[in-house]
Amino acid sequence: MTGAVWWERAAREDGEGRIVPGPAPAGVQPELTEATREAVRAAVRGRIAGYTPDWTDPDRQDAGVALVRLFGTQTEPVLARVNRLPEKVLAEHLATAGVRRRPAGAAAVLLEFTVNPPDGTSVLVPAGFQSAASGPAGQTVFETDQDLYATPATLAALAVEEGGTLQTVPPGPAGPSRPFPPFGRDPEPGDSLWIGLAGTASPHPRLTLGLVVAGAPPAPAVSGAAVPPSPAPLLRWDVLDGTRLVPAEVVRDSTAAFRTSGTLELRVPRSWAPGRPPGARTRPPLRWLRVRIAHGAFGRPAPVLTGLRLNTVTATAARTVRDEPLQPVQDTGAGGGRRMTLSQVPVLKGSVVIEVDDDPGADVFGTTAGTASRWHEVESLAGYGADDRVFTVDHATGEVAFGDGVHGAAVPPGFRNVRAVRYRVGGGAAGAVRAGAVNAPVTGLPHVVGVTNPFPSSGGTDGEGDADAVRRGVGELRARGRAVAPADYGVLAVRAPGASVARARGVPGLHPDFPGAPIPGVVGVLVVPPGDDSGEPPVPGAATLRAVADHLTREAAPAGVTVVAAPATYRRVAVEAWLALDPDLDRAAVLAAARDAVRLHLDPLRGGEDGDGWPFGGAVRHAPLVRRLLAADGVLAVSRLSLTVDGVRLPPCADHAIGPHDLVWPERPLLIPVGDRP
C-alpha cells in the first residue's frame, strides 16, 4: 500500500502533529487528534459526498443531521482519552521504573463524645468506633484511632496561675470562651493551668483532653542529631484530691507539651475528692486538675489555647477491614511473583498487615501445628533478597504483589493461605469536612448519647493523577532513592510513610532554631501539607515532621547529615486592584472569577506560572498579577494594583521580594470597579 490514506493525510496536514502543553518533562506533548465535537462533525460532513451522494438535505431537522451531531457529541470524550495516550504511556513507564502514583490521603479529625451512664462512671469507647459525615458524594466514615474513656463530667472552670496569682478564664459551653495563654503571657517554672471538672463521679481510669493551640507551628523535627533541638519544657500533671496534690501519669501526649494541637491522655487515681485550689477559696468545690511548668521554658511567643475539650480522640476518614483471605489474580505475564488482590479500595498506604501460612511441605505426616508469619509492605521489591518477606500494594486497585524468590521471598503454594489481618480503606478529599459535620454514629454503644467534631478536619487528598506523577517522577528518577543534592530531599520527603506532605524543599545549612546562620552538616526540609478549607495556610503536624525527618535520615540521607523538618514560613499577601468591567456581563460573576484567578495564582500548592505551587522565595510581581486579572472574562482593564504584605501597604505597581525560603499566602483580594467602559 503506497498511497497516503485519509487518516494519514489528516494527521500530516502541517507536516507534524500539533504540539500542545502537557505534563511531560519538556512541558509539551503531541496532540494526536483534534478532540472537539465540531471537528468530528466536520469530518463526517466531508465524507458525505463520497459515501452517500444522494443525501443532499442539510436541514437541522433532518434525521441524518441529528445523527451526525449525536455522533460528534459521543466521540468527543473518546478522542480526549486518545490525546491522553502520551501522558498515560509516560506515567506507566515511570511506574515500571519505580515511580508510583501517590495514593489518596485520609483526613483526620478530633471527635468529642458525650456520655450519660446511670452510675456516672467513665464509658470505654474502643478504638474503631465509627461515625459518619454526610456530603455531596454520600457518607464519609470516620474511625477512632485509640481507645477512649469518656467521662460524663463537664468542664466547669479554668484558671491560670502566674507568679503565684490565680486568674480565672471564663468558660464557654464546652471550653474556653476566648483564646488564652495557659501559663500566662510570660511563662516561667512554677506557672500553672488549673482545670476544674464538675460531675457526680470521679473520672477513672483515664481522662482525655483535646487541645487546639493557636499561632504556634510545631517545633522542628530533628534526626541525625548534630545540632540538638530546642527542648520542650517539663510539665507536671497533678490532681487536687481534696486538699493534697496527687501525681497524674501522662499516658499519651500528641501536643508536644502544649506546642501543637492534639490530644493528651492522663491516668488519674480512682479516688479524687472535690476541692478548691489555693487562692480560690470562695469558689464551689470541683475536681481540679493542674499542669505546672516544672523545668525549662517555652519559646517566644508563649502558647495560646483556642480550644480545650473533654472526651476527645483522633479519628481517620477510613474503615478497617479484618481477617480477609486474599484472592489470587490470573497472571498473564511471563514470570514474576505471585499476585493477589484485596476486596475493597482505595487502600490507605502502610495500613496492610498480611500473614502467610508457612510451607507445610516438609511435614508429610501433618503432625506439626501450622504457623504463620507476618509480611511487610514496601515501596518496591527491587532492593530485597530471597529471604525478605515483603510485598507491594497498588493502593488504587488493591493488588498485592509478592516476590519471585530472587527479589523478595516467594509465597508458598496453598489455598487461602494468605490473609490480610487488617487494612484500612478510605481517604480522599471527601474527608475534608467542616466543624460539626461528623455527627452520625455508625457503631452502636450503650450510654453514648452524642458525637461530633468541634473543629474542622485536616488533610484529605485524592490520589495522584498521571500528570502530577509525571512531573514528580523526573526528580525521583534523578534522586534514585538517595538524597545527594538539596533538591533530592524535597522530592523524597513526599514519600515519607505516615506523613501528609504535598510538597517540600530541601535547603542546605538551614536550621529554624538558628536563623541566619548556616549550620554545616544540616539539611533543612520545609514541609507543606495538603490544604483545607479553613482559610489559613497549611501547616504540617508534629507527626508529619517527625515522619519526614526519620524517613530521610533512615532511607535517603548520607551518614553524618542532620535532617531538620520544619513548617514553611508564609508571607500574607493581599491584592487591591481597580478594574474596568464589561457592562454587558454580570458584575458579581466577573469579580468572583477575577478574585479566584488572583488567589489561584498565589496559592502555595496550585499557584505559580506552571500550576505546581508558588515557588519558594518567588517574588510577587505586579505584571503577572495584572495578566491574571485581564485573563478573567469580563475584565477590560486594570487601572491600578497595589499589594499589602503582612499588614504593610506597598506603593502601587510595586513588586515585592520575599525571603529565599518563604512562600506566600493569598488573603481575600479587594477588587474595586471603576466604572463601565462605553
Image: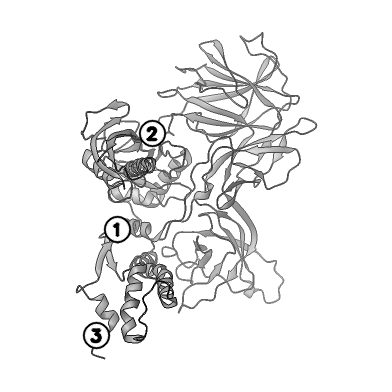
Determine whether 262 is above or below 345 in the image: above
Picture disc at residue 4: 3
User: What's the CA distance linking mark 3 and mark 1?
Assistant: 42 Å
Q: Position of residue 582 (x, y in %)?
A: 30, 43
For residue 661, which quarter of the picture? top left
User: What's the CA distance linking mark 3 and mark 2?
Assistant: 72 Å
Q: Are marks 3 and 2 in contact (CB under 8 Å)?
A: no
Residue 436 in sight: yes
**Is residue 394 left or right of 585 when viewed as pictured?**
right
Q: Residues within 10 Å of mark 3 (few under 14, many from 20)?
A: few
User: What's the CA distance linking mark 2 and mark 1?
Assistant: 31 Å
The residue under the point 45% across, 66% down is 385
Determine whether 292 is above or below 625 in the image: above
Amino acid type, residue under disc 1 in the picture: Arg
The residue beneath circle 1 is 478
Q: Residues within 10 Å of mark 2 (few under 14, many from 20)?
A: few
Q: Position of residue 505 (x, y in %)?
A: 32, 45
Quarter of the image with the N terminus in it? bottom left
Q: Position of residue 98 (x, y in %)?
A: 39, 63
Secondary structure at badge 2 equals: loop
For residue 277, which quarter of the picture? top right
Q: Nearer the viewer, mark 3 or mark 1?
A: 3
Quarter of the image with the C terminus in it? top left
Q: How many numbered marks, from 0 up? A: 3
Q: Earlier in the sequence, mark 3 or mark 1?
A: 3
Amino acid type, residue under disc 3 in the picture: Ala
Picture disc at residue 228: 2
The residue under the point 43% across, 37% down is 535
Secondary structure at badge 1 equals: helix
